[in-house]
Image (cartoon, rainbow, N blue to C red):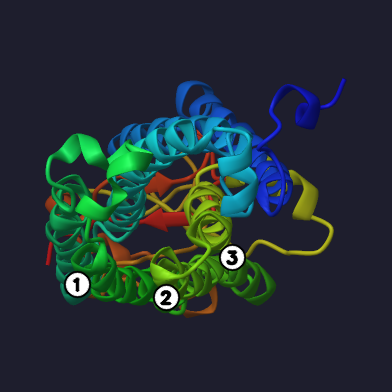
């Protein structure tokens, strides 16, 4: 017995939307599980972003659940088919519940991306940080009317899912506002997809790794494209066959939601992916030794400072906006004399903070060295 036998209103664009949403949702769920594993077992970086991502995932999963129920009752099918099987009330009810959670999930996902990028850019360009905060605040503010308006387009509000009182509803204000909010959401997706490349550009890491990460994190542009199509598809609600047109809107809404969660999960799980890329990507090593506060010379050729451990080999990288005084930019700039480093006092050197790598190991792909100016 198929779904059409149990749910006769199921059909049209519904089956395609169902398969796409569940497929993308499964991939995103796997990525989220891996993120939690990395956070608990490998890395302590990005706790705030992970919590926000889990909230976004939960809201998106709830959205997907109600959309599946709405699809089974006719979402994506022609309105005549829904009417003939008497499922219009259930279709309206579950569709509007889905839209409510969708409007909660979309801005939450963007805020989670912003939180991760801010933590990644902790020692970086303050302009980038401010712009990311502005993107998050803008999406939150603009989505408040998006959440509220649908519930006031009918008088009384209960007419929203009552087939006999649809003439008491006027969705034009809500749809027209969707054009504006959706445009901002699309621009935000494009910005959040492009800005990681600008953050990775100055890092001293393998060029292939830099390009690869920029590309993977830049896949968020697909969420921006989906937001554009989804915004256009909102106009189909005002058409002659709205139940069929909403299938297009939901399809691209699913893509936008899940793609954001998938692409934002790639950098945090990089410690798990990195071993599989070692044959294609070479890490550049850099020796860093903590300075001797007394400036003494080494008695051993292998250790230029006495009473200090040997150099720590780490993956190069600094995302700081200012350069550390007296510290070289690349391995070949490291002076052979200990005097150039011994001039730095203990207060000028702090333990490097490895981002997205194993705690206590140089396996991360980003390391932010903290220096006081």
For label 1, the SS is helix
Q: How many tags in the picture?
A: 3
The circle on residue 213 is 3
Image point (42%, 55%), residue name = 367
Figure quadrant of residue 208: bottom right
Residue 83 seen from this side: yes
Residue matched to label 2: 190
Q: Mark 3 and mark 2 in contact (Cβ < 8 Å)?
A: no
Image point (42%, 46%), residue name = 354
Is residue 131 left or right of 191 when viewed as pictured?
left
In the figure, 288 relative to 222: above or below?
A: above
Work out how far the residue at label 1 is from the one at label 2, CA to CA, in angstroms.
13 Å
**Is disc 3 surrounded by few (<14), some (14 to 19) or many (20+) residues within 10 Å?**
some
Is residue 301 left or right of 22 when viewed as pictured?
left
Is residue 334 left or right of 209 when viewed as pictured?
left
For label 2, the SS is helix
Mark in the foreground, 1 or 2: 2
**Is disc 1 surrounded by few (<14), some (14 to 19) or many (20+) residues within 10 Å?**
some
Work out how far the residue at label 3 is from the one at label 1, CA to CA, in angstroms.
21 Å
**Is disc 2 surrounded by few (<14), some (14 to 19) or many (20+) residues within 10 Å?**
some
Choose the circle earlier in sequence order: 1 or 2.
Answer: 1
Is residue 343 left or right of 354 when viewed as pictured?
left
Work out how far the residue at label 2 is from the one at label 3, CA to CA, in angstroms.
16 Å
Image point (34%, 33%), residue name = 55
The circle on residue 131 is 1
Q: Nearer the viewer, residue 243 or 324?
A: 243
- Percent across and percent down for residue 260 are 48, 55
- Percent across and percent down for residue 176 are 25, 73
User: Image quadrant for the C terminus?
Assistant: bottom left
Residue 336 seen from this side: no
In the figure, 215 relative to 359: above or below?
A: below
């Amino acid at each position: 017995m198929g779904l059409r036998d149990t749910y006769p209103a199921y059909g049209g664009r519904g089956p395609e939307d169902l398969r796409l949403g569940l497929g993308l949702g499964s991939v995103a769920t796997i990525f989220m599980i891996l993120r939690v594993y990395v956070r608990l077992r490998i890395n302590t970086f990005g706790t705030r972003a992970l919590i926000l991502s889990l909230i976004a995932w939960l809201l998106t999963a709830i959205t997907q659940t109600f959309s599946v129920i709405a699809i089974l009752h006719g979402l994506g099918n022609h309105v005549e088919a829904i009417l003939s099987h008497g499922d219009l009330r259930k279709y309206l009810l579950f569709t509007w519940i889905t839209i409510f959670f969708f409007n909660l999930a979309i801005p939450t996902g963007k805020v989670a991306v912003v939180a991760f990028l801010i933590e990644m850019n902790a020692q970086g360009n303050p302009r980038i940080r401010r712009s990311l905060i502005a993107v998050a605040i803008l999406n939150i503010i603009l989505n408040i009317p998006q959440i509220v308006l649908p519930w006031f387009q009918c008088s009384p509000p209960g007419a929203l899912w009552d087939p006999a009182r649809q003439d008491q509803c006027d969705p034009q204000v809500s749809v027209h506002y969707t054009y504006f909010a959706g445009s901002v959401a699309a621009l935000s997706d494009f910005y959040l997809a492009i800005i990681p490349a600008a953050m990775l550009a100055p890092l001293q890491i393998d060029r292939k790794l830099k390009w690869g990460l920029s590309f993977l994190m830049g896949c968020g542009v697909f969420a921006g494209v989906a937001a554009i199509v989804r915004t256009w598809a909102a106009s189909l609600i005002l058409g002659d066959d709205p139940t069929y047109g909403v299938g297009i809107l939901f399809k691209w809404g699913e893509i936008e939601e899940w793609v954001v969660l998938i692409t934002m999960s790639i950098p945090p799980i990089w410690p798990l992916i990195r071993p599989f890329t070692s044959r294609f990507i070479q890490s550049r090593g850099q020796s860093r030794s903590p300075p001797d506060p007394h400036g003494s010379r080494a008695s051993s050729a292998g250790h230029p400072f006495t009473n200090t451990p040997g150099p720590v080999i780490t993956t190069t990288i600094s995302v700081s906006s200012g350069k550390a005084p007296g510290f070289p930019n690349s391995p070949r700039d490291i002076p052979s004399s200990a005097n150039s480093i011994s001039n730095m006092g203990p207060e000028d050197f702090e333990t490097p903070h490895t981002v997205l790598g194993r705690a206590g190991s140089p396996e991360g792909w980003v390391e932010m060295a903290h220096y006081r100016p």
